[in-house]
Amino acid sequence: MKKTKIFGSKFSATLIAFTCFVTVFGFSQAEEKAKEKKGNLIWDAGTVQLELEKLGAGVYAFYPTDAREKNPKGHPVATSGGFVVGDNEVLVVESMINKRLAEQVMGFVKKVTDKPIRYVVNTSYHGDHAYGNYAFPKTAKIIQHSKTKAFMDNKEAFEADKKFMIQYFGANRGIEDVVSRTADIIVDDKKIIDLGNKVVEIMHLGFAQTDGDLFVWSPDNKVFWAGNPVVAQPPALPWLLNSRHEEVLTTMKKVRSFLPDDAIVVPGHGIPIKPQAIDFTIGYLEILHKDVKGAVEKGMTLEQAQKSITMKEFQGYALWDWVHSGVNLTNTYKELSK
Ligand SMILES: [Zn+2]
């Protein structure tokens, strides 16, 4: 982990997190077979196939073809996204991890409309959501939060980020070829875009997983792209890689109260879900806060807290040990014992 010293602490945290992720993933018995096939990859950027689902007039989601089977089991899958088609132009949400997947997305758009892709939104700087930007036509404008742009404009950090992504999503899967392409349009608060008889809202509602999380909302069709802050349906957990669990909780409550009950949520890594599924995340964060606070007040060590806080009703995620005990509980304990 020599590289972690070169870059800022947030970046280090992500790198450490990825490393831990793979370590734990490697030991998970449930994934043993997959491991034999794929080595240490979390998922394989060279083999992921996307499928398209129409959610309403001019509104589409895409997600990995194995998501429908793996999401309910709590197994991780590749990135989800979507696009909105207006009378004049198209807005795409997420550019994916490499050119191959970006081209699958552009192929989906071509299949349903001859309107040009004018906007590409990244919900965060994470490579699986933003690396594909460079593959989109020059006439498409990239939309990011300023913090996302700042991360991807840092050449050294970006090249190091690519190396880590290659380690966990595969070498010679096109990640080496990725060139950082960042925002033409910055959204740090809210922006409404009219695609021609079709409006899309892009908003930052606070810290949810990174400093630059964006959400995308199609008000006509009540479709909401959540990105990583909603990983997938339960039992997937939020990843508090950069801690700040109280801010995450506040933001997720904002998201939940923003959404009408009949909305459709496209998560960061799965098939579309109902807003009620976000209650699982909110409940998890509330009980995590309460239990860890209690443990700190009782004077428990981190190890004692890890043993005693099992939160059985939230278990089931294939990455439970690492995400819950290793990341979420540990970071929350550190925050609350300050
Ligand atoms: Zn992601």
Image (cartoon, rainbow, N blue to C red):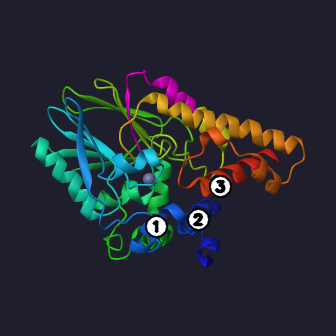
Nearest the camera: 84 or 34?
A: 34
* Type of amino acid under label 3: Val
Q: Nearer the viewer, mark 3 or mark 1?
A: 3
Q: Is residue 104 above or below residue 263?
A: below
| Whole-number angstrom distance, CA of label 3 to CA of label 1 | 23 Å
Q: Which mark is residue 327?
A: 3
Q: Which mark is residue 337?
A: none
| Whole-number angstrom distance, CA of label 3 to CA of label 2 | 12 Å
Residue position marked by numbered label 2 in the rendering: 24
* Type of amino acid under label 2: Val
How would you rate the neighbour count of disc 3 (Cα within 10 Å): few for under 14, some for 14-19, many for 20 or more? many
Residue position marked by numbered label 1 in the rendering: 158
Residue 294 location, quadrant: top right
Nearest the camera: 29 or 66?
A: 29
Residue 133 location, quadrant: bottom left
Q: Is residue 56 above or below residue 40?
A: above
Q: Earlier in the sequence, mark 3 or mark 1?
A: 1
Could one spot residue 213 in this view of the protein? yes
SS for callout 2: helix
Q: Earlier in the sequence, mark 2 or mark 1?
A: 2
**Region rendered in magenta:** 251-269
SS for callout 1: helix
Label 1 near label 2: C-beta < 8 Å? Answer: no
Marks counted in the figure total 3
Q: Nearer the viewer, mark 3 or mark 2?
A: 2
Residue 169 location, quadrant: bottom left
Q: Position of residue 14 (x, y in %)?
A: 57, 61
Q: Is residue 135 above or below residue 148?
A: below
Does 259 lie within the magenta span?
yes
